[in-house]
Image (tube, rainbow, N blue to C red):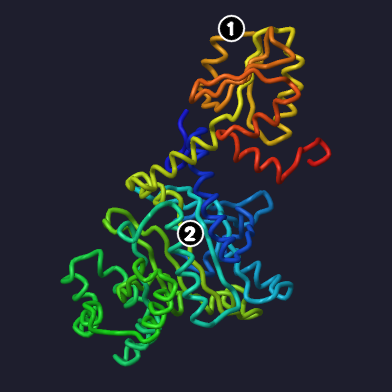
Amino acid sequence: MQPLPGFRDFLPQDCAARNYIFDRWREVARRYGFVEWDGPVLEPTDLYTKKSGAEIVTQLFNFTDKGEREVAMRPELTPTLARVVAAHEREFKKPLKWFSIPQCFRYEKQQRGRLREHFQFNADIIGEDSLDADVELIALCVDLLRAFGFAANDFVVRVSDREFWIDFLRTQNVPEENWQEILQIIDRSEREPREKTAVKLGPLAEPAFKILDGKGGSEKLDRVLAALRVRGLADFVEIDLGIVRGLAYYSGVVFEAFDRGGKLRALAGGGRYDNLIAQLSDGAVSLPALGFAMGDVVLGELIGETQAAREKLGTAIATEQNLDIYIVIAKEERRADALAKIQALRDRGYRVDYSLTAAKVGKQFQTAEQLGARVAILFGDEWPQVRVKTLASREEQLIGNEEMLAYLASLPSLSSRAERSDVEGPRGSTDR
């Protein structure tokens, strides 16, 4: 039996890698003052067709439920966000700065960097129309990628402005009903031969190519870049008017993040969507809004190809999976004493394991090594003293049972865990 196409099993090492990504996302988002929220995995299908049109159904895992409702597994979280904000916006001071890490599902052809299920980081600012909010969101995108060990030569965030193109189309007297089609052609222009794009654009080709070749400018985007330069982030950002974002609901500054090598699909993308909440709430609530998403699949691809990021991930996985302490029970008559100490150590926040059944001492030490334990503690003939062995250095020390906790806290290999224990304090059963 294999998982369905485009779906993943997460073995312990994969789970540790996923947790590392989630931890970095959460850590950076909270530094920016964002708070976490979530919504349901299942929503009415028309929530998505209302945002993206009927053609989105071909990309959904959708069905009729037992209540005869047409429902779909979420392909993204933005429609749910719009629904939630429309229902609850009066309960919160503006602007809202919310982030989430939903699992999303799309029934589409799987390819490198894109599966039929994935996790993605979403960040949105609701209720703020100033350009400072756009700058804040782009800075967050940059810092999220920096948190994984990527440098300016590893990735770039390309920034554009749909309003610039709308103004261009107006000056060219293009009917409004044709705007979206033209914008999608411009958005795809980098991925197809120029001759093909020229045929699609017709008389617009020459003036559009002048802009795409850098002969057009945007005062708004110059201000965005200047603000990011003040933050020291300008090296990570480029103005690129070829970025349009094909979805019709974007209304202002848009951006996408790419690896510098150009080997992967976009790492992240988003922008301003000031009219979407009003559209999805049938005009009941109208709030300016902007947001972006970053997927875990393509991010994992870039981590695997970048040495500094790969090393950080390896360290994080080892930190999460390795034990602090392995208890070696050399004499079965000492098992009760060992179990009492195991519970005390776990209450202090240490990661502790031991053999559930009687085993040879050598085999127990071998297991300690295999589990990456920093320290092994042997309960044997020397009780009420125990032998503490630091596995990396092979140093051993005979310690009295009553002094064990203080001694462990003094060990450099366990100091970080001891400091955390001092902050949290012992945890008893009533704390759950």
Q: In this view, does 136 lie above or below 22?
A: below
Q: Residues within 10 Å of mark 2 (few under 14, many from 20)?
A: some
The residue where tag 2 is placed is 57
Q: In this view, does 134 lie to the left or right of 241?
A: right
Q: Is residue 10 left or right of residue 326?
A: left
Identity of the residue furthest to the right in this view: 430
**Looking at the image, do the residues carrying marks 1 and 2 touch, with CB atoms under 8 Å apart?**
no
Q: In this view, does 310 lie above or below 272?
A: above
Using the numbered discs, state the Cα–Cα distance from disc 1 to disc 2 in whole angstroms: 60 Å
Which numbered marker is on residue 382? Answer: none
Find residue 218 and report its horizontal and vertical position in percent: 34, 85
How many tags in the picture?
2
Can residue 9 be seen here?
no
Foreground mark, 1 or 2? Answer: 1
As shown in the figure, which amino acid type bears the numbered disc 1? Lys
As shown in the figure, which amino acid type bears the numbered disc 2? Val
Q: Which residue is drawn at 32% across and 56% down?
A: 154
Q: Residue at x 59, y 56 (%)?
A: 71
The residue where tag 1 is placed is 360
Q: Is residue 271 left or right of residue 327?
A: left
Q: What element carries label 1?
A: loop
Find residue 137 and report its horizontal and vertical position in percent: 49, 70
First in sequence: mark 1 or mark 2? 2
Q: How crowded is mark 1: few (under 14 residues within 10 Å), some or many (20 or more)?
A: few
Name the foreground residue: 281 vs 214: 214
Find residue 136 and report its horizontal and vertical position in percent: 50, 72
Find residue 118 and report its horizontal and vertical position in percent: 48, 49
Q: Is residue 371 left or right of residue 65?
A: left
Name the foreground residue: 339 vs 197: 339
Q: What element carries label 2?
A: helix
Can residue 398 be seen here?
yes
Q: In this view, does 145 lie above or below 93?
A: above
